[in-house]
Image (cartoon, rainbow, N blue to C red):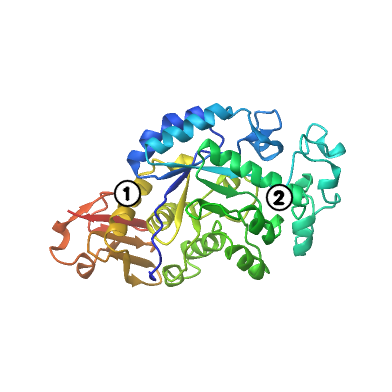
Amino acid sequence: MPSQPLAADALVHLFDWPFARCAAELPQLAAAGYTAIQISPAQLSLPRADWWARYQPVDHRRIEGPLGSEADLRALCAQATRLGLRVIGDVVLNHMASGDGYAAHLRYPHFGPEHFRPRVPIDYSDLRSIREGWLAGLPDLRTDHPHVRAEARRHLDLLLDCGVRGFRFDAVKHMEPEFFDAVLEGLDPGLLMFGEYIWQPGHDAALADFRARLPLMDFELHRALGETLKGERGWEPLDAWAGDAVVFVTNHDIELAQYQGFELPVDGLDLAHAFTTARLDSVPHVWLEHRAHPVVRAALRLRRAAAAGGGWETLHAGAQSLVWRARDGSALLVLNGAHAPRHVAQEWLGEGGWDAWQDLLGSGPVLASRQPGLYLRA
């Protein structure tokens, strides 16, 4: 693995959970080694219980809805701070609600028709159309308008005042990069901020524009990981992959079938969890249903050990396997992507051999096919 800055955070996404339920879960998450949680959009949205209604904002100046009140959010953030965790807000700034007749009149508490682009569908072969069209019929804000940018910053400041300490920006490819220059100006650089940009061919230049401003959810790495797990490429490119992004095995859009083509092979999910959670140059973004997965829990322990031990060094990166060991010898990760068992080599174990290691998954010295081995120096 190339030398990269070590990412301190490990994030679990408590998708569509009420703030009070999130708060009750925090002690277990802190004990497991997570350092942050992502909540669903907190602003006043369509008054419906459906999860997608959180992504149809009505008033960014109000924290209100099925997830809880502003007081509930403040209580959650205070509890998180006490436990050494930070709350990451999911922020929807590209569009407003279309339901309940809003798309017809384009009048909201702080926006009027002059703040929206003309109603046209998106042509995904044209970058300008992607940024200026209406996403799935949702009224597209003129994100180049000074008032729209001011309202976006007002919303971020409200969340920060509540105690939120980072942001996940929804649908960033549907906004111009300069929007973020204006809206994020002067914010604490220590905030954990990242954008959702779903990769598609021909977007390299646009992706570079956004990466110059904030990290992104790494859909490119996810696609490359899928190719490796399907046997279409070896582990070498993944070992050399540059970081500074947010990595994931799945997310709410994949789980809820909002788009297709991103699912990983089922028999490779344990390998994917180990790889994305343990790597130190990125922030792992863990889906709520996987927060207690044994491989994720073990990989979090390896992540902490390797970070304290100077980072990972690559012992082997081949067609079917990848091996990392902490530079101080405190942690060892072995990924066996082959459809056959693989011995853990003596040279990977180092001084003391097998007896010097704690086997976190009970894998033993012979890894089963398509399985990871995660070990800490005993």
Task: State the SS at label 2.
Answer: helix
Q: Tell which of 267 and 172 is nearer to you.
A: 172
Q: Please name the amino acid that badge 1 sits on.
A: Ala
Residue 287 located left or right of residue 6: right
Q: Quadrant of residue 108?
A: top right
Q: Nearer the viewer, mark 1 or mark 2?
A: 2
Residue 334 located left or right of residue 182: left
Task: State the SS at label 1.
Answer: helix
The residue identified by callout 2 is 149
Whether residue 18 is visible here, answered yes or no, is no
Q: Is residue 30 above or below residue 126?
A: above
Task: Please rate how many residues cluster around mark 2, counting C-alpha atoms within 10 Å: few if below 14, some from 14 to 19, many from 20.
Answer: many
Q: Residue at x 35, y 62 (%)?
A: 336
Q: Residue at x 79, y 56 (%)?
A: 132
Query: Which image quarter is the N terminus in?
Result: bottom left
Q: Earlier in the sequence, mark 1 or mark 2?
A: 2
Residue 80 located left or right of residue 58: left
| x then y, percent, for residue 343 | 25, 64
Q: Residue at x 45, y 67 (%)?
A: 238
Q: Residue at x 66, y 66 (%)?
A: 206
| x then y, percent, for residue 57 | 70, 38
Q: Please name the amino acid that badge 2 sits on.
A: Arg
Whether residue 320 is visible here, answered yes or no, is yes
> Residue 298: which disc?
1
